[in-house]
Amino acid sequence: MSILDKQYPTNVYRLILTTAAAIWGLGFVIGKSAITTVGATWFTAIRFFGASIVLLIILFPHIKRNFCRKTLKAGMIIGVATFLGFWTQFLGLGMTTPSKNAFLSACYCLTVPFIWWVVSRRRPPAKVFISAAICTAGIGMVSLTEGFSISLGDGISILSAFLYGAEIVTIGLVMRDNDILTTTVVQQFTSGVLALLLALTTQPMPTAAQVITPEFIGAMAYVAVLSAAFGAVAQNTAQAHVSPSEAGLLCSLESVFCALFSVAFFGEALTPRMALGFALIFASVVATQLGDKGGSAAAAAATNSAPEESAADGPAATTSRESSEPVKRNRGRIAR
């Protein structure tokens, strides 16, 4: 049994998503200069190709055993959604301020419950919508430092929030029926191919002088190995056990960590407004867990639930430990 096959308490998967959000938040700060150097499209291509190569080297024996047409299809579907979300965010970043881009793109915590409602035809609990609204207000206080107005870059950033939301919902629908590691490698490779094709047709090739520098290599190493490779495995693993709505909320903490790292390492002042924003975001995370029993009992209940309920509530179906017969899985899914 691999570490990914073992069932852990739900709070472990919440912690995994929070850790991934922290890594993404620091990556946003570290990768900003690299985006400026080569442009959003080339940055996206290098990020995902680097991640897929790293994962392929580390996981090749596992991938060789588990690769099949089903995982290929799932990984390609998630990869398209991942590419669209990341590319539109980076594109918007080049046309608006970083603070507004961080705020608007992180509003996927608000779009995920509605997208999930449409796809699953099940209305999420009221606490999900309340928590998402509180989180959005908190992100705004943390990220927005100037007057708010809508520009083209802002509109693209808003679009990225919907596309990120669609990616999170797609992962929730697809990942639980597929091998996580193999699907993740296909996801990263698909995103890299799409970004590379777009870069080759729309952008000039980066020069050696631009990319062969310690700063650029260091930044890309971080975003490829940690943000993309580790972050994708962590998100895909956790989302097999956490509902898409809650996953969207926890992933949106990326913008909070981005602000915190800017304060800690780059001298940005921590204002009372930012502190209030952090408090609101923390309150939103707590609010999602009110009335949630969590822990192993919840995981066991999820394992024994009917397929339709599993799709609505988010926890994964797992293989029975007492017998070799797999627990019945939900087949009513397509295939982030």
Image: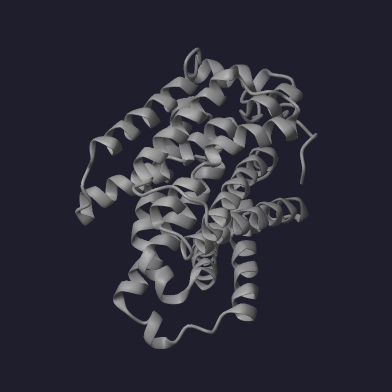
Residue 254: give x, y in percent of width and height: 41, 45
The vertical placement of 3 against 208, above or below, is above
Residue 319: give x, y in percent of width and height: 65, 30
Q: In the displayed structure, does residue 324 sit left or right of residue 44?
A: right
The vertical placement of 207 against 284, above or below, is below
**Residue in the picture at 52% in, 52% down:** 150
Front residue of this view, candidates 161 and 243: 161
The part of the image, by quadrant, that contains residue 83 is bottom right
**Residue in the picture at 64% in, 52% down:** 183
Question: Would you say residue 336 is visible in this rendering?
Answer: no
**Residue in the picture at 28% in, 45% down:** 260
Report how many numbered discs are placed on residues in the image. Answer: 0
Residue 120: give x, y in percent of width and height: 74, 30
Q: How is the image coloured?
A: one colour
Residue farthest to the right, as pictured: 332
Question: Would you say residue 283 is visible in this rendering?
Answer: yes
Looking at the rendering, in which quadrant would you find the N terminus? top right
Front residue of this view, candidates 324 and 314: 314
Residue 123: give x, y in percent of width and height: 69, 23
